[in-house]
Amino acid sequence: MTRIADTTTSAPAENSNGARPRRNTRPYRALEPGRPARIGRGVLLFLAAIVTLFPFYAMVVLALKPVGPIILPDSLVPWGLSLEAFERVMGARTLLRWTFNTLIYSVVSVVGVLFFSSLAGYAFAKKRFPGKEVMFWSFIAMLMVPYHITIVPVFILISNAGGVNTHWGMILPTLANAQAVFLMRQFIKSLPDELFEAATVDGCSEWRMYVSIVVPLIKPILATLGVFVFLWHWNDFLWPLIVGQSNDMRTLTTGLASMNAENVPLNVVLAGSVVAFVPIFMAYLVGQRYFKEGVTMSGIKG
């Protein structure tokens, strides 16, 4: 009777002392950069970090200088610091009003953009209806239209509706975000269809599936997109400048720019810039974990 040969791969032979032979790692070591290359890379990264952080250093140090003329580069030395500029900024009623306007504009826009873009992304990703692809790509085609081309007709519509010098006039045109809808659709499209089929069999409504299935699974991309939308609205200048024409409706960006035109000392302007920077930095720290997770998952699933 013919015996069938064993085709299984045999284990690596062991040495006399019972230990397995070490693998040859020389080919991998040959791909590693040498010591001069590592030192050069470290120097380049160090120089890049200095160039990146120096504007922030200059902003903080100059804001902490006593109010008066600034002489460069002597004023960049962190000596003789004072909180006089911050006392002026924090004591100004207009800055508090500008901060309130910026918070309303940024936070409400973030909530609206995330809500509407997630609903639209869910519909485009998991629902079937006539003209879905045509409607989606027509909406995405808005990304090809420059923002500055549409700003005049949008302002005319908002002005005719009485939205000038109002919060809703600033917020309403920003809620239709084609880029946010595209990102939501791509992320939700990667979710397993079996989840929604099982929910349909169990009798879940569309709203229940959105709240109980979609929202918990898209938290990383919600946080990532929320950080980007918040930063964009917090730093937005052109649209708030056009719509918020009165002094009480200015945001921090437009208000700080108006201070330069009023010959306000540079120390006070930079102190206001530091105050405006803190909420952005705090928003990133709060959403940092979800931000990294969202970027990673978007790269894997995209």
Image: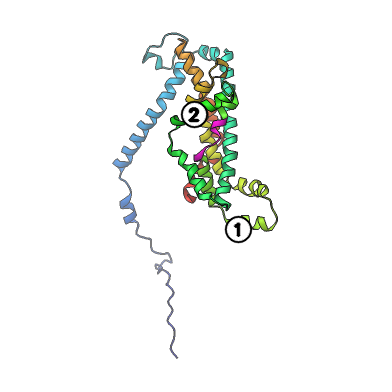
Amino acid beneath label 2: Pro
Q: Which residues are magenta?
A: 172-179
Looking at the image, which is closer to me, 123 or 76?
A: 123
Q: Residue 273: image x %, image y %?
A: 49, 20
Quarter location, residue 19: bottom left
Q: Is residue 214 above or below residue 271?
A: below
Magenta includes 74? no
Quarter location, residue 43: top left
Q: Is residue 40 above or below residue 93?
A: below
The secondary element bearing badge 1 is classed as helix
Q: Residue furthest top?
A: 68
Amino acid beneath label 1: Glu
Q: Which residue is mark 2?
A: 153
Considering the whole magenta stretch, tell me its main secondary structure: helix
Q: Is residue 187 above or below residue 224?
A: below
Q: CA distance from mark 2 to mark 1?
A: 44 Å
The secondary element bearing badge 2 is classed as helix
Quarter location, residue 220: top right
Q: Which residue is mark 1?
A: 194
Q: Residue furthest front?
A: 160
Q: Image point 54% across, 12% down: which residue?
A: 88
Q: How many labels sit on residues?
A: 2
Closer to us: mark 2 or mark 1? 2
Q: Image point 44% across, 14% down: which residue?
A: 79
Q: How is the image coloured?
A: rainbow
Q: Residue 125: image x %, image y %?
A: 55, 50
Q: Residue 289, can we see it?
A: no
Looking at the image, which is closer to me, 19 or 90?
A: 90
